[in-house]
Image: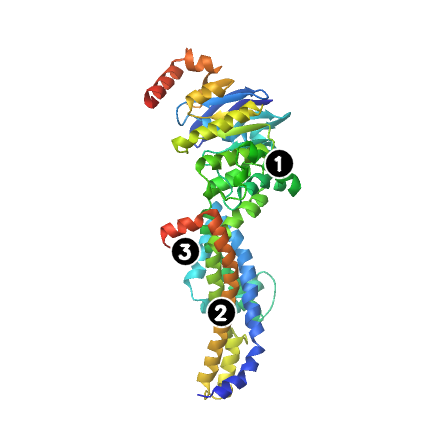
Amino acid sequence: MLNIEHLDLSFGDSKVLDDINLEVHKGEVITFIGPSGTGKTSLLRCINLLEKPDGGRITLGGDTYDYGSITKKETLDLRRKTAMVFQQYNLFKNKTVLENVMDAQIVVQKKSKAAARDKSMAELARVGLEAKADAYPHQLSGGQQQRVSIARALAVEPEVILFDEPTSALDPELVGEVLKTIGEVAGSGMTIILVTHEMSFAEDISDRVVFMDRGKVAEEGPPQQIFRHSNHARTQQFLRKFYTASH
Amino acid sequence: MDIQYMIEIFPRFLLVIPITILIVVLSAIFGLMLSIPVAAIRIRKIPVLSQMMGAYISFTRSTPILLQLFLFFFGLPVLLQLIGFDIMKIDAITAAVACLIVFNGAYMSEVLRPAYLAIEKGQHEAAESLGYTPFQKMKTVIIPQMAPIALPGLGNAIIHLIHDSSLVFAIGVVDIMGMATIMSGDTFGMKQVEVFLTVALIYWGISMISEQLIRLLERRKKKVLKNTGYKLKEEEAGYSV
């Protein structure tokens, strides 16, 4: 359903992503792990063109887009098939929780206000925040804000939701509620690409785990293989460091 | 002091108040419109153009407006002649308005630019990631957040503009100040204090009314600031944004 071929990205002289190929099936949950600065987030941002790759192709929802020659119209088209959940939530500060979830449906999808409101309330109920519909983002905790941003992503019914380290900015006691929500979204059959440092969560939720190192896919496979039986030296080294650091 | 005389001459000023208001309103509206592309060029750091705008802003902000008025009044016909329009002299009001538009284009762009830059990158990216066009993003997300930050600066610009517009009499526009100089001449300087005091009261009145109009907008601003949480930052920092 989502297919990335030969994606390259560089910032100035430094190569950030080097010939990335990735195939994601409908309903699949793919998690990217790896050391900081290896391009996991950049890859996610390339998928919806928040970063513009130097070259490569992406196929999503039946259409193929060539990164090298993508037009403005195609960019909007591609972005409208995806939704992103950011590390810093990035809720629209000037809008209430409900307006945050409704806005794209009205502005981008041209839905009626009533239809957008119904859809938004349903998604807010799904993340357990319908009671906060009229609050403004700054009145919510980080965990609540992130759940609203998940509702905002769900509300546009994207082909895929991109989660960019969704719990990294949260206080430790708030991480659980967000992971639970992501778990429920994954369980509902949504296609998910996730970048995270929550290893045990990644192991639980993922259908496939991709270990990235220095802008390349170093190893990929089922979570059991990557986390328990990796035969790749860099993966083992990374996970060992990770576990010794956090336990 | 002849208060009776002040009351007597007041109606004559009513005839020219619209001239001042016309100059102010046109300069404010078109100045703001001009300031948008100027700010955009500076924000995007478009090579060459950005440096040109930098020089333009620096020049307009560091030379006296009176001088700029003279440059426009005497210089525009020369400039127009160079590109083929042969007019000996341009209408003083046109020159005055053109000059104040150019001045405010620079001044207001320096209000808009920091207001734009104050909006977090994440707000842009959130809208972009959902497929908003640049226009949709500006309209529904960015400008509503910029407005409360820019409003005090734009309000100040307009109050300054009202005061600066009093200089246009120097190139022969009969605005409030122009009328005052005529009247002062009519009485051979005998009633100067009364004339200029009347003018001062009129400017005070116009400024007060403008301030009230701006304050109406600011009340909305306070609400937005409170909602966005900027209000909290403002209190922390101990100053008004």
Q: Which residue is drawn at 44% across and 84% down?
A: B193
Tell me where residue A7 appears, x and y as whole percent: 52, 24
Determine which of the numbered discs, if any, sits on residue B240 in the image. Answer: 3
Can you see residue A86?
yes
Closer to the eye: label 2 or 1: 1
Give how far apart the Cα atoms at labels 3 and 2 are.
Answer: 21 Å
Give the vertical position of B212 relative to B140 (above or below).
Answer: below
Task: Give the side of residue A228 with respect to residue A70, left or right.
Answer: left
Same subunit under labels 3 and 1?
Answer: no
Looking at this view, is B131 or A194 the one in front? A194
Task: Give the side of residue B135 with respect to residue B6, left or right.
Answer: right
**Mark 1 Cα within 10 Å, few/some/many (few <14, many 20+)?**
some
Residue furthest front in the image: A131
Give how far apart the Cα atoms at labels 3 and 1 are.
Answer: 39 Å
Closer to the eye: label 3 or 1: 1
Residue marked by disc 2: B208
For the C terminus of chain A, the image quarter is top left
Task: Give the side of residue A80 with respect to residue A135, left or right.
Answer: right
Looking at this view, is A179 or A242 the one in front? A179
Question: Disc 2 residue type?
Answer: Met
Task: Give the side of residue A225 with respect to residue B18, left or right.
Answer: left
Tell me where residue A220 appears, x and y as whole percent: 48, 16
Give the vertical position of A117 relative to B175 (above or below).
Answer: above
Is the C-beta separation of discs 3 and 1 under 8 Å?
A: no
Same subunit under labels 2 and 1?
Answer: no
Residue marked by disc 1: A119
